């Protein structure tokens, strides 16, 4: 009897779930939001303690016990944010988190304002990805048009333009000879077909 059957070495790991990249993006971004909400609560409590300390002159912060997590966004807002997160491409997940952290550290929002700030970052990322998608689409269209125009340019026509042909008549020659110039414009080059050669 083999030892592998006793220990289950050949079995696939049970703890690792097969999730799609979209689910992972939603989970990651929502975890970041909840962490930033907790941090905003913590900063709010620290500011209150500092205010009380200044107002009373005595620190009773060691007596106060705060709940672990008191603020939570509404279920409807959570669903909307999760829907917006699902529209974020996985390659934008990191930049969204970085931008969100920058704005939180810059503005130091109240606890109730964190989710609105998060929503604005998600909208900004969705607009940016939409602009990049349109730019790629235009580039693909340009490349296909450019390829067709190049194929037309490589096509050789039967007519040739000879701007410096040796037998081009000029107006000055006609004036010197005293003849009337021909009807064509002298500033234009002469066009000949290949049959003339």
Image (tube, helix red, strand yellow):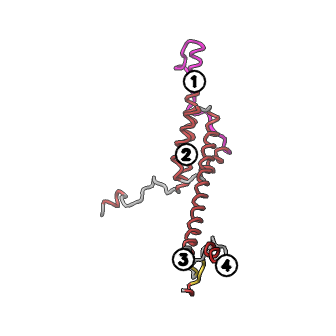
Say which label, 3 or 4, has the lower sequence index. Answer: 3
Q: Which secondary structure lies at badge 3?
A: loop
Mark 1 touches mark 3? (CB < 8 Å) = no
**What's the CA distance linking mark 2 and mark 1?**
28 Å
What segment carries the magenta color?
47-76
Task: Tell me if mark 2 has few (under 14), some (14-19) or many (20+) residues whose alpha carbon lies within 10 angstroms of its own.
Answer: many
Please name which of the two marks, 2 or 3, marks the residue nearer to the observer: 3
Foreground residue among 125 and 134: 134
* x and y, in percent, of residue 85 in the image: 59, 49
Mark 4 touches mark 1? (CB < 8 Å) = no
* x and y, in percent, of residue 165 in the image: 54, 77
> Would you place residue 103 above or below residue 5 in this image?
above
* x and y, in percent, of residue 147 in the image: 55, 70
**What's the CA distance linking mark 3 and mark 4?**
21 Å
**What's the CA distance linking mark 1 and mark 3?**
89 Å
Please name which of the two marks, 1 or 3, marks the residue nearer to the observer: 3
**What's the CA distance linking mark 2 and mark 3?**
66 Å
Q: Which secondary structure lies at badge 4?
A: loop
Per the image, the residue denoted by label 2 is 96
**What's the CA distance linking mark 2 and mark 4?**
80 Å
> Would you place residue 145 above or below residue 56 in this image?
below
**What's the CA distance linking mark 4 and mark 1?**
101 Å
Instruction: Name the residue rendered at 35%, 56% in the picture.
Output: 7
Say which label, 1 or 3, has the lower sequence index. Answer: 1
Per the image, the residue denoted by label 3 is 165
Per the image, the residue denoted by label 4 is 179
Instruction: Name the residue rendered at 68%, 45% in the picture.
Output: 76
């Amino acid at each position: 009897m083999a030892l592998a059957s006793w220990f289950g070495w050949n079995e696939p790991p049970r703890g690792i779930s097969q999730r799609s990249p979209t689910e992972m993006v939603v989970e990651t971004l929502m975890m970041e939001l909840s962490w930033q909400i907790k941090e905003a609560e913590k900063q709010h409590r620290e500011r209150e303690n500092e205010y009380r300390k200044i107002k009373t002159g005595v620190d009773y912060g060691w007596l106060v016990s705060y709940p672990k997590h008191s603020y939570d966004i509404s279920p409807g807002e959570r669903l909307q944010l999760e829907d917006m997160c699902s529209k974020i491409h996985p390659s934008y997940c990191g930049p969204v988190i970085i931008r969100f952290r920058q704005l939180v550290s810059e503005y130091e929002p109240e606890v109730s304002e964190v989710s609105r700030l998060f929503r604005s970052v998600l909208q900004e990322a969705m607009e940016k990805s939409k602009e990049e998608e349109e730019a790629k689409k235009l580039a693909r269209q340009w490349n296909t048009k450019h390829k067709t125009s190049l194929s037309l340019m490589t096509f050789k026509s039967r007519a040739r333009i000879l701007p410096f042909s040796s037998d081009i008549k000029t107006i000055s020659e006609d004036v010197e000879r005293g003849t009337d110039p021909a009807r064509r414009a002298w500033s234009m080059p002469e066009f000949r077909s290949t049959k003339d050669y």
